[in-house]
Image: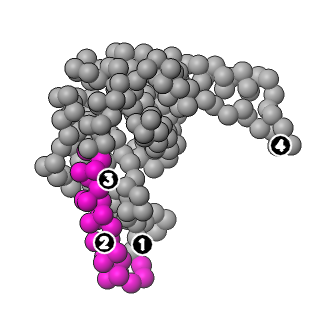
Amino acid sequence: VHWQRRSRAGGDEVRPFLLVSNGHDGKNSVQIMTCYHRVCCNNTLSMALGEGGVVHFWHAGDLVQNIETAKEKLNLMVAGIDDNLALFNAMRERVLTAEERDGFVAALTDYKAPVSQEGETGDGEKLERHEVMARAMGMKLNALMETGLGSDLPGVRDSLWGAYNAAIELCDYHLGARAKDRAGYLMWGAGAEFKKQALEEAKVLLAK
């Protein structure tokens, strides 16, 4: 489902959609969530709009009540779309300092030390491997802030909007290569959690 509302932050077009996932295996429910499509690079900016961010219900029970509940939450989603498009524009106007940019990268690439079964920090080899991964992610994220898709649009490269989209591009195109279900990884799994963290870190910087 696509609305005609869209953000044009500095010529960077974003279109809002509703994503509907219908499970037919008895294990997964029907889910409806809000996502935004960044046209210049085909990124999907998925996010939750408070308590109304995701609608889900099963093919069982009181279907009439499920439908009424879905309508209420869909109304919340639609009401929140303009707020999020305004958020995107505010992020576009927020220029990051070098210190803020480094902090944003560190927050998204700071791997926790592995923990052994005894509850102690994992062995040196595992820890070193995690540190290498964190450094590689940080270097890639910094590179995408400079040369990622859409970074050449006016005012994007040094903005919070540019940093946020670099994180989304990192996730969509470079993380989760071993995931068996790539779509699931990006929309509901670890990739979705990474995107959520990127948005939360962006909101913290925007509030300063």
**In the figure, 42 relative to 147: above or below?**
below
- According to the image, label 3 marks what residue? 34
Is residue 41 among the parts visible in the rendering?
yes
Question: Closer to us: mark 3 or mark 2?
Answer: 2
Q: Residue at x 16, y 48 (%)?
A: 5
Question: Closer to us: mark 4 or mark 1?
Answer: 4
N-terminal label among 3 and 2: 3
Q: Are marks 3 and 2 in contact (CB under 8 Å)?
A: no
- Does the magenta-highlighted stretch encompass residue 66? yes
Percent x, y of residue 47? 38, 48
Mark 4 residue crowding within 10 angstroms, few (<14) / some (14–19) / many (20+): few
Q: Residue at x 55, y 31 (%)?
A: 107
Query: For the view shown, which residue lies furthest in the left direction?
Result: 4
Mark 3 residue crowding within 10 angstroms, few (<14) / some (14–19) / many (20+): many
Could you say whether the residue bearing mark 1 is in a helix, strand or loop? loop
Percent x, y of residue 93? 29, 30
Which amino acid, by three-letter code, is at mark 1?
Trp
Measured Cα–Cα span from mark 3 to mark 1? 19 Å
Measured Cα–Cα span from mark 2 to mark 4? 44 Å
Q: Residue at x 42, y 82 (%)?
A: 61
Quadrant in which the C terminus appears: top left
Which amino acid, by three-letter code, is at mark 3?
Thr
Comparing 56 with 158, the one in front is: 158
- According to the image, label 1 marks what residue? 58
**Magenta region: which residues?**
60-85
Could you say whether the residue bearing mark 4 is in a helix, strand or loop? loop
Measured Cα–Cα span from mark 1 to mark 2? 17 Å
Which amino acid, by three-letter code, is at mark 2?
Glu
Percent x, y of residue 90? 30, 37
